[in-house]
Image (cartoon, rainbow, N blue to C red):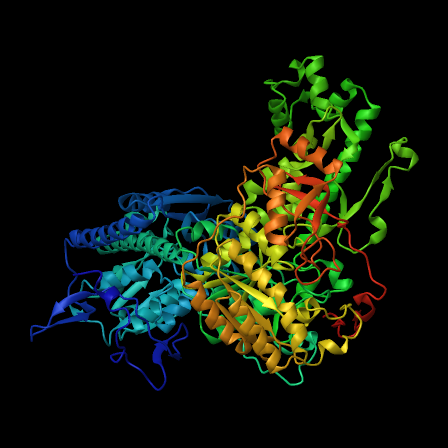
Amino acid sequence: MRLSLAFRHAHRSHAGIRRSGAGVKVLNSENRLIPVNSTVSYLQAREASSTSGTSETVLSFKSHPRKNDGPLYESAVGGLVQRSREELEAIRETNPGLKPTLAIIQTGEDDRLLEVNKKMAGKIGLNVMQICLSHQCREEEVIEEILRLNEDARVHGIFLHLPQSFLSKSVRNAIKPQKDVDGVSDLNVGRVVLGDQRDGFASPVAGAVLEMLARHDAPLVGKMAVLLGLEGPLKATLQFLLQNNGVMVQTCQWSSKHLQKQIMDSDVVVFLETGHKGLPPTWLRPGMAVINLSSALMEEQPDSWEHRSEAEAESSAGVGSLSAALRMQHVVRSSRRWTQEQQYQPWRLRPLKLQPLSPVPSDIEISRAQTPKPISQLAQEIGLLPEELEAYGNTKAKVHLSLLNRLQHQPNGKYVLVAGITPTPLGEGKSTVTIGLVQALSAHLKLNSFACLRQPSQGPTFGVKGGAAGGGYAQVIPMEEFNLHLTGDIHAITAANNLVAAAIDARILHEATQSDRALYSRLVPSVNGVRCFSPIQMARLQRLGINKTDPSDLTPEEVRAFVRLDLDPEKVTWQRVVDTNDRFLRKITVGQANTEKGHARQTQFDIAVASEIMAILALTDGLADMRARLGRMVVGSSRNGQPITADDLGVTGALAVLMKDAIKPTLMQTLEGTPVFVHAGPFANIAHGNSSVLADKLALKLVGEEGYVVTEAGFGADIGMEKFFNIKCRTSGLTPDVVVLVATVRALKMHGGGPNVTAGVPLPKEYISENLQLVADGCCNLKKQIQIAHLFGVPVVVALNVFKTDTQAEIDMVCRIAEASGASAAVQCHHWSRGGRGSVELAHAVKEVASQKNHFQFLYNLQDPIVEKIRTIAQKVYGADDIELSPEAQAKIDYYNQQGFGALPICMAKTHLSLSHMPEKKGVPTGFILPIRDIRASIGAGFIYPLVGTMSTMPGLPTRPCFYDIDLDPVTEEIKGLF
């Protein structure tokens, strides 16, 4: 007898099953025929030799039961254990720390089942844990325990050893099917019925019964079996397994009126004792197979053992050992499936069909005309696990950072940066190009690709520029959700930022109005008669060189050093933020109420995306790193010139709590159903202007080695791209394979001397009619931006974002000049009007250029002096003759050098409308001196940022903002006017 034979024949033909019409004839408990339209393939059998010398799989009886068959059971169990052990050893070759665990949930503290399973598990190398619930526990408590175990990665099998009254449908189906090693969930029972157990499990008790029946010599086909006292999934599973071997099955209860006749007419009896003493010997005829399941299910009472016959005792012992061995085999296979799931999964992306219309409708009409996939479906298509997804509705979800650990050995895909020439105030479509490119790569070239975009600020959304979801037939959808609150990340940043601001002013007030002793008593209060330092206070003591843990041990001098930050109100550098363009918050006075006791000071608001916390979110590589960066943020200086940090304020832990969900990138999709990460949103003119490092890293793992991640840098290449290379790439350790440089005929005409372009005002005629001379003259800006990319050793593909007013002659001229200026390729793009199909040529060019080796390098060495790093950027990138430092800027540089901040990279805060500091100077300005009026430090984010000219960190609203056109239909709840 070979136990594994039936497993190898799990999907064999069912031609031998006895059928009537559409289904097998089965007798139910009322002795009525019921049709069963299914086949089952989970079967234990032995190999028997036919007279012709060939082998066939059979289930058979002999006319008399065998004696002394114990060794056969031991052999079968031993074979199972050996195979399970070998399978586990193979799994551990790639997962050496894995030790799968079976969790048993039971009522009461009876350890008999635990000991049986623990003994079997020990032979294989598994763990067994026992959860004992009260006999009076409620269904909700059982489900709560199951749900907890579902999410425990150490647990690979859950076994419900509960009374039948506890095994409701809700309880059974609460178990994840992949952990349901006893096959009690409806899904796993259904898989048995359908004959498909590749991803599920059948009852190990049912499997043990079939294995025992294989010890007889007469074929099972045509025999009659009675299932007595069985309920629920076990009854259903065993019934179908027997039927699929040609056995006629009756199910009945101990109270059945004709029980004796049913038993005596049967060839097989499988029963479960429920307070009864077993079957009378006079009912059992010679050759009958009788199997008692009570031992395997631990249902019998100890005083019933002495009433068993020798055959019953043997069958009970056999089925108990076999079912335990099979259960452990299921745990091993569950762990194997789990380890396979943890590996990289090939994409099964199904793009959404796009049918572009002409003329092209409004962005919001296009967005609403497309029905997005459920976000869970998209996640499954790109290889995300269910536990890695945190849904926010049906169309967006956060992705857990645990993905990075799971795919840590997966090679990265190709890294593509989309930048642009110096834009008009209308923007030139970098987001649109980014989305069109990934739609082309994935939906049309069938290559894995991911777009990584910044979350838009509500300032521009309600101000001038509008939304940032792309446009036309290259959009992220739903565009309303993308452009508004999304998953609340910017609100979390606002709350965290303003908590720091509140802590600063409160600390200044309290230190000014309390003695050292009073401050100490409030900062380290007595709770239930005990005083102790919090962890963040212990860290401050250590920074002060005070190595004491008992608050009562500090000297008066140490107490004073501990409680006094001595923040200078005139040197507070931290500002409050709000995600609205509000020019009247550029300079304000706080603390004017009487309750603040005269401690008023001047300060200002910045826009939320200019907060250092936003920069930290965009540059961090995980929760621990984010918390450390938040703690290092310098909020001002003490009166003796020492930097004061968020750690000193004691607010770091609270900031990490506020940001714990914001750190997870948000998954969305394009109009063609390709994936997009939306995460972080720092402006490029007043911050570093790139989406998050984490989003890029997650995407690079998900696309696979042959895939593409397309990320965007804000504004022109002189700003967003330069910061991408010098700041983001230094932080992430990632290097780009190609730069896609976006240009438009409109912007080139502006740089060639065309009239001013103003948002909300119709374009002058020069921009809507052919003018080759303006285009040719304006290509100087395109040539300069290509040269900037080449400073970093990265090849360039120019993407000309075509508008309907562009002529073919203008398009051809731009592409010709771009290639002559050093671009590896220059292609026209029509994604706005055609979707991904309009960017297929760009996708081919990116694929070809990205496959070539580049020579990436940074523009400056971090160890260079701050002044020299600023000068390098000004001269090599902007084209300035030199820089000019204000006295205030020079003093800040001296201070930062003194504090040890001199080796940080530089993040220039400069207008995006010109290569110079003068917005009106278009093309490629020369002969100018770049004025540095101030310098600030974002120590947590990890960069120094000089303020060039009159750059403001709080935008203002124009005369006619976008909000004039935005409204809500109160009946349909549809949003109008977003673009």
Q: Quadrant of the C terminus?
A: bottom right
Residue 897 falls in image quadrant: top right
Residue 425 falls in image quadrant: bottom right
Taking the spot 52% from the left edge, 69% from the top edge, the residue there is 820
Residue sitting nearer the eye, 722 or 135: 722
Query: Percent position (x, y) of residue 667?
Result: 57, 61
Image vertical order of residue 751 relative to residue 950, above or below:
below
Taking the spot 64% from the left edge, 75% from the top edge, the residue there is 472
Query: Percent position (x, y) of residue 613?
Result: 66, 45
Image vertical order of residue 257 relative to residue 22, above or below:
above
Can residue 477 be spotted in the picture? no
Residue sitting nearer the eye, 778 or 212: 778
Image vertical order of residue 793 relative to residue 849, above or below:
above
Residue sitting nearer the eye, 321 or 509: 509
Image vertical order of residue 926 relative to residue 261, above or below:
above
Query: Percent position (x, y) of residue 807?
Result: 63, 81
Left/right placement of residue 652 relative to residue 268 reads right
Q: Quadrant of the N terminus?
A: bottom left
Taking the spot 77% from the left edge, 50% from the top edge, the residue there is 952
Task: Tell me how many marks there are.
Answer: 0
Can residue 703 be spotted in the picture? yes
